[in-house]
Image (cartoon, rainbow, N blue to C red):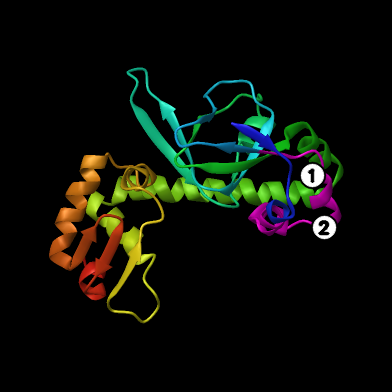
Amino acid sequence: MKTLRLTMSDRAILLSARFFARLPRTAAEAILEGATVSTHEAHDTLFRQDDPTDDVIVVLSGLVRLFRLGKDGREADIAVSQKGEMIGVNAVFLDRRATANAQAAEPSIVARLEGGKLRQLAAEDSDVAQALLELVCHHGKMTEDCLAEDRLLTAPQRVANYILSHCPIGSESFSFRLPFQKNVLAGKLGLAPEALSRAFSTLRRSGVIVKGRMIEIRDRQALEQF
């Protein structure tokens, strides 16, 4: 891991993120004061579950995987955070211990914001408090959506929904490149890698062709009806 200074490009990414875009510029600048940047190789650990932490992390590039470990050592993926997404807000406002493990899924750069400063500004500035509330509610909705998909959809249906979310409006056939490795997609969808492979095989009947990280869809309607 290398620690770097916040560049103008980094600041631009941060200020366009969901949380900061909601804030007046003066409040955003106050939060960014003292922020640091660190680089990580794939599989580097950013923090471990239950570790003391008082940083909020914002992904500047790459992917950060959040997961929990069971007593038997099995991993349960919670989220895959991408550019502009914040990690660790719950911890700095609860008992200042990490609620999950965070690992770089690929070479990544992240910004670290001071939790103490964020708590202070939230107490003093209603704009900061409101932006944090909206962010936590957004994360809560994402968790609800994931839970509902896990309970209501089969593995092929989850994969089909993910593919359709990349379909351009009005297109009946299209192709796109997965933005990350298949094992990361499996975790994002709450599937084991072998379950993802079986889902792709099942979706082949609906015109889904997978070659490496390239996915081709030949019949959107067939996929929608799956």
Q: Earlier in the sequence, mark 2 or mark 1?
A: 2
Residue occupying the point 18% across, 60% down: 203
Residue 15, by quadrant, is: bottom right
Highlighted magenta segment, given as a residue range: 12-37
* Placement of the N terminus among the 4 image quadrants: top right
Front residue of this view, candidates 75 and 109: 109
Disc marking residue 209? none
Disc 1 target residue:
31
Residue occupying the point 25% across, 49% down: 155
* Placement of the C terminus among the 4 image quadrants: bottom left
The image shows residue 22 at horizontal and vertical percentages of 72, 58
The image shows residue 140 at horizontal and vertical percentages of 54, 46
Q: For marks 2 and 1, give the CA distance.
A: 10 Å
The image shows residue 101 at horizontal and vertical percentages of 49, 29
Type of the residue with mark 1: Ile
Can residue 19 be found in the magenta stretch? yes
Front residue of this view, candidates 106 and 189: 106
Type of the residue with mark 2: Arg
- State yes or no: discs 2 and 1 in contact (Cβ < 8 Å): no
The image shows residue 62 at horizontal and vertical percentages of 51, 47
Secondary element type, mark 2: helix
Q: Can the viewer see residue 80 in this picture?
A: yes
Residue occupying the point 52% across, 24% down: 49
Disc 2 target residue:
25
Secondary element type, mark 1: helix
Look at the magenta stretch and give its main secondary structure.
Answer: helix
Can residue 47 be found in the magenta stretch? no
